[in-house]
Every structure is written in structure tokens, then in C-alpha cells.
Amino acid sequence: MFLPKYPDNPTPSSAHTHAPADPAPVQRSLPSVSVDHKTIAALVVGGVVLTALLAAVAVTAISVAVAAVVLRSLLREQHRR
């Protein structure tokens, strides 16, 4: 019932056609990218600005956390009195 049925032809026909023996080489070139000094300077300045912004955010977060701990300890001392 579940046995596979094989085709009667022992050699199946080739569904694929062969390419010629000596095809012409295909030359694909990538577009040239020109990188000058202005582009490099813009990337470096952008990296420096982004790093400075990240550092500013980190320092702000740390200072807010320290202020929260100080205020919490001051308020806790007021409730004990």
C-alpha cells in the first residue's frame, strides 16, 4: 500500500541542458567608490561627536543615580526622627 512506485524508464531524461564547452568569460565590476580626505574627516568627526554624546548620557545617568541615593538617605533619616 505504501510502497513507492518507480518509473519504468531506468534512465531518466536530463532536464538540464549543458553549456558550451568554452563560454566567454563574464566580467562584472563593482562600482568604484571614491574616498577622499573630506569623507574620512567627516566620519572621524561624527564618531567623536557620537562618543561624546554617549559619554554625556552615561555621566548624567550616574549623577542622577547618586542624587537619588542621597535624597533617599536624607528622607529616611527624617522619618526616623
Image (tube, rainbow, N blue to C red):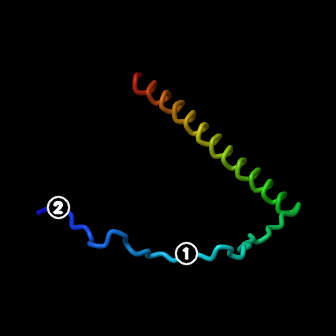
Give the residue at mark 2. Answer: 3
Toward the top, the furthest residue is 81
> Where 11 sits versus 53, above or below?
below
Give the residue at mark 1. Answer: 18
Residue type pointed to by label 1: His
Residue type pointed to by label 2: Leu
Residue 34: image x %, image y %? 83, 67
| Residue at (27% x, 71% y) in the render | 7
Quadrant for the C terminus, please: top left
Say which element carries label 2: loop
Say which element carries label 1: loop
Residue 47: image x %, image y %? 74, 52
Residue 9: image x %, image y %? 31, 73
| Residue at (46% x, 30% y) in the render | 75
Q: Earlier in the sequence, mark 1 or mark 2?
A: 2
State the CA–CA distance, disc 1 to disc 2. Answer: 34 Å
